[in-house]
Amino acid sequence: MSDADTPREVNLLPDAIQHAVKPGTALLRLATTHTREGILDGAWWPRSRDIAAELPALVTALTEHLGPVTRVGLDSDAWEELPTRLTIDDRIVHIDSFPVGDDTILITRNDQDLFSLLVIPPHATPDAARTAMARSVRADNLAPAQQILIDTGTGRARPTAEEGPHTGPEHRGTS
């Protein structure tokens, strides 16, 4: 990672997983060829479920590596309020939302170039997030995002109604 105090950053493999992973981090395995292997192209660990606060940093960083991002597809159940578009770096990014529960974010560049990132829940522990992110960027990974989260003990992207929105580890023990 570049600077340990930077709140949101994107890192490229292979050595990025060796550094401390914290909320606001994205790990990417960028493969723009037609022969992509694996299901996921990377992972993103947002700091919150506020897409208007989280998405601009991700899109800005991805734009540096991929070129302009035109669309983002999100699971509507995993985020608080979802607008239909955001202006990021003076460009309009359209937001498509679907109640799919698949724990991913789809990034579109141009009309046909699509990147799929695992979304690590904001409440995940650093160890679980690091493990899930490392697994998601492996070229031989064939597990869907939801299975990676289950296998790594990371949990689901959005807590159930019984758990409430503020019951993750970052909210426990505070008053």
Image (cartoon, rainbow, N blue to C red):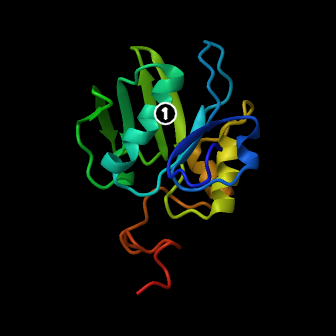
Q: Residue at x 46, y 76 (%)?
A: 171
Say which of 107 and 140 sits in front.
107
- Asked if 5 appears above or below 112 in the picture, the reply is below
Give the residue type at disc 1.
Answer: Ala
- Image x and y of residue 54, in percent: 39, 48
Q: Residue at x 72, y 46 (%)?
A: 17
Residue 32 appears left or right of 84:
right
Q: Which residue is mark 1?
A: 61
Say which of 108 and 1 sits in front.
1
- Image x and y of residue 82, in percent: 27, 46
Quadrant of res 70: top left
Q: Residue at x 31, y 39 (%)?
A: 97
Quadrant occupied by the N terminus: top right
Q: Secondary structure at mark 1?
A: helix
Say which of 59 and 109 sits in front.
59
Residue 145 appears left or right of 168:
right
Quadrant occupied by the C terminus: bottom left
- Asked if 106 appears above or below 25 in the picture, the reply is above
Q: Crowding near pointer 1: few (<14 within 10 Å), some, many (20+)?
A: some
Total number of numbered labels? 1
- Image x and y of residue 90, in percent: 27, 27
- Image x and y of residue 169, in percent: 53, 73
Q: Residue at x 68, y 54 (%)?
A: 20
